Each structure stands twice: as C-alpha cells, then as structure tokens.
Amino acid sequence: MHTFIIIWLGQFVSTIGSQMTFFAITIWAWEKTGSATALALVSFFFFAPSILTSLLAGTIVDRVNRKVLMILSDTVTALATLAILLIYLSNTLQIWHLYIIAAVISPFNQIQQLSYQVSITTLVPKHHYTRASSMGSILSYGSSIIAPALAGSLYPMIGLVGIVLIDLVTFAIAIATLAVVPIPQPKTPRVSPNSESWRQKLAFGFHYIGTRQSLLALLAVTSLFWLFHDVGNAVYNPMILARTDGNAVILGQVASAGGIGGVTGAVLVSVWGGLRRRIHGILLGMVGAGASKILFGLGQMPSIWIPAQFCSSLNFPLLGSSNQAIWFAKVEPEVQGRVFAVSFFLRQIVSATGALFAGPLADRVLEPAMKPGGILAPLLGRIFGTESGAGIALLYVTCALCMMLIGLSGYAFRRLRHVEDILPDCDAST
C-alpha cells in the first residue's frame, strides 16, 4: 500500500487546506448575510453542475489516465481558490461569486473523487479494500479535526486572505505527490471504445446496476439515506451559528469533535477490518448515525452537541467503508468508472435537492413557525425552544429520524440483506 499511502497523504494535506477555506468562507458568508438559504445555496451550486457531468465523468475516468485527471482537477480547484482570493482583495467579493466558483469546480471535484476511488482497486490488494476505504474516512474526518481548529483560531488574526494562501500551499503539496508516484491503469475494457456510441457509454452504468437487483437495492437505500443526511447537513452550520450568535469558536469545536469521532471510527475499522457481513456495517451505521443526530438536534448547547457529533461521526467510516468494499468486490475494475459514476450521479441529485430546499424550508417556513406566536411553537416549543435556530433544529431532527428508520427498514429486503451472497465477486472465476 506504499503508493496509495503517498497519494493519501498528499490528499490529506490538501483537504485540510480546503476545509480551512470552506470554514472561513462560511463565517464570512454568515457575517454578511445571516441566512441559512445563502449558505445552503453554496452547496447547491457545488452539487448541481455535476449532475449533468457525472455520467460523462465515469466514461472519462475509464478511458483517460487517472493520474493526469487527478492532477488536472486539483489544479483547476487551486485556480478557483486563487480567484476567490483575488476578488476578495479587490473588495468586491459577493455571495454570488461563491455560487459561480462552486459551479466551476464541481465537475472537476467529481472527476478527482471518482479517479481516486476507482484507483484503489489497482493500488491495493482485495483484502485491504475495507481498510483503504476507511483511510478515506480518516482523510475526511482527520481534516475535520485540524481544519476547524486552525481556521477558527487563525481567522481573527489572518482573515480569509491568510487561510486561502495556506490552502494554495496545500494544493501544491497534493499535486507534487501525485506527480511523483505511478497510478496503474486497469486492463483494456472488454468492449472497444470505438464500438460504443456515446449514448451506450453514458447508459452503461445504469444497465449494469439495473441487471443486478441487489446492487440496485443497495444504491436505492444509500441514496435515500444520503438525501435526508444532506438536507440536515445543509442547515448544520446555520443551526449552530444561529443558536450561538455566530460563535466561530463553538462551531469549530463541534466540527473538531465530529472529526475526532470520524478518525476514531476509521482507525477502528482499519485495525479491525470491519464486520464480516459488510451489509450489517452499512445498515447499523445508518441507525447509529441517525440516532446520534437526533440527540444533536434536540440539544441546545455545546455540552450536548460535542459528544453527539462525536458519536454520529463514529458511524460513518463503518458505513462508508462497508459500502465501498461491496462495490469494489462486485464490480470489475475496468468498468468501475462508469458504474460508480451512477452512484455519484444520484448522490449529486440528492445533495443538490437537499441543499436547494433545506435553506428556504428552514428560513421561510420552520423558523417563523417556531418563533413565539408561530403555529408550531405551542406544540414543539418545549422540545426545541422558540429562539433563533429552533426551526432549523426541527428540520435537522426530522431528517435524522428518517436516516435511522431507513437503516432499520433495510433489513426487511432480502435482496439487500443478502447482497453479498446473491452477487459473486468480480474475481470469483479467476
């Protein structure tokens, strides 16, 4: 796993920088607008363009050198980050600038993630799939420990400018690590690229999953889970900022607690290897995450948020690595780009939908309804309070309850429950 670890380290450093920039931009946008909708729309514009490009991205990843694609994607994202810095230095940065930049980097971010994911099967042996996937969780959650703490403490001193400059340095490190290591390409696809029309190339992933009903069931359940997760996630930062009068330190502490929980879970999975029946890791992870988020949304103070966020994040490495390990084992490496692109495609749809509707639903419907004199305040005020952020918390808890119920209901479907038995591994005949 030597080459994989080098790539992983470069991406880890870069992710810290990117999350620091996102944290600083979140604080800047909240100070400027005080609107959950404005923050949610940044997420919407980040996800929406990739809906149109995700299937094409799968075909590109299967045909083009993945090392080149990852370097190109990191370079474009770095240039977009530089654009934010230059606009800010000109004293003309507006919230709509962030929407445009998010839309520009969205397709490249997707290509980068897809290239990284499908490269795992060519870089590590099969028995390390779960561990390699859990290292992806360490990458994500580890940066969530470091980035908010650094950004929260540095933002008052160096501002957005200093944090963006740090981010640009981390991009250079990531690109350098990619440049010095080889990334093997999979064997030539069984179907010649010239014999397929573009329509066939784009539809390949749908046909592949559609003819394997257990994979289809797995994709449906995880997509539904992420829909409710992403609705709640779109209002996560506004909920904390609203309940703490915009306190960046508390926001950073809660985010860091989530990072610690995620890293703890990822390290446990890396050492342990996960459950033998990976479907249990997926469904139980959904239940645990949903239950923890219910407690988080009901809490109205950091002493509840911090342990609840830790427990919530503890579940996601098990959930994510178990899910990825099943897909890695069941799908041939030479077609993983197009097949995984379908999952990315649906994920972008649910993420964009969640981000688009979460903000207005919170700002215009639930927040007024939970204010003193609002229609829901007499019924739910004792649970969520009636101060700023109560309506957002109601939406967050509703989504968390749905996440937990989806995990429990997954056991009712045989094709999902026995996905690992029904479908043979892609290398079973070799």
Image (tube, rainbow, N blue to C red):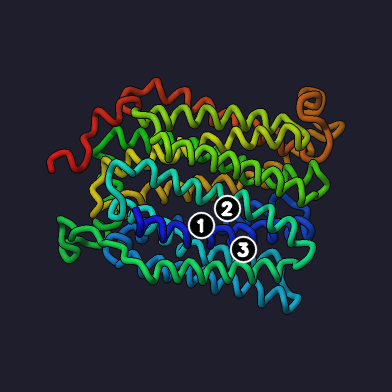
Helix, strand or loop under label 1? helix
Q: Closest to the observer: 372 or 338?
A: 338
- Callout 2: helix, strand or loop? helix
Q: Is residue 245 left or right of residue 74?
A: right
Neighbor class of circle 2 (other Cα within 10 Å; few <14, some 14-19, many 20+) is: many
- Cα–Cα span, label 2 and label 1: 7 Å
Q: Quadrant of residue 262?
A: top right
The residue singled out by tag 3 in the image is 99
Percent coordinates x, y for residue 50 in the rendering = 46, 58
Disc 2 versus disc 3: distance between alpha carbons?
Answer: 24 Å
Q: From the viewer's side, name the closer residue of 94 and 408.
A: 408
Q: Mark 2 touching mark 1, by CB under 8 A? A: yes
Residue 201 rendering spot, x and y as whole percentages: 26, 58
Q: Residue at x 28, y 47 (%)?
A: 125
Residue drawn at point x = 26 percent, y = 40 percent: 330
Decide: few, some or many residues near mark 3? Use Cα within 10 Å; few <14, some 14-19, many ≥20. some
Q: Position of residue 423 (x, y in %)?
A: 23, 33
Of the numbered discs 2 and 3, the one sitting upstream in the chain is 3
Q: Residues within 10 Å of mark 1 (few under 14, many from 20)?
A: many
Q: Which mark is residue 12?
A: 1
Whether residue 52 can be seen here: no
Local secondary structure at mark 3: helix
Disc assigned to residue 143: 2
Work out how far the residue at label 1 is from the one at label 3, CA to CA, in angstroms. 25 Å
Position in image of residue 73 (x %, y %): 45, 67
Q: Mark 2, mark 3: which one is toward the viewer? A: 2
Residue 210, by quadrant, is top left
* Residue name at image x 44 percent, y 43 percent: 134
Q: Which of these two is toward me, 264 or 208?
A: 264
- Write the residue at 30% across / 47% down: 206
For the residue marked with disc 2, what is the amino acid? Ser
Can residue 427 be seen by looking at this rendering?
Answer: yes
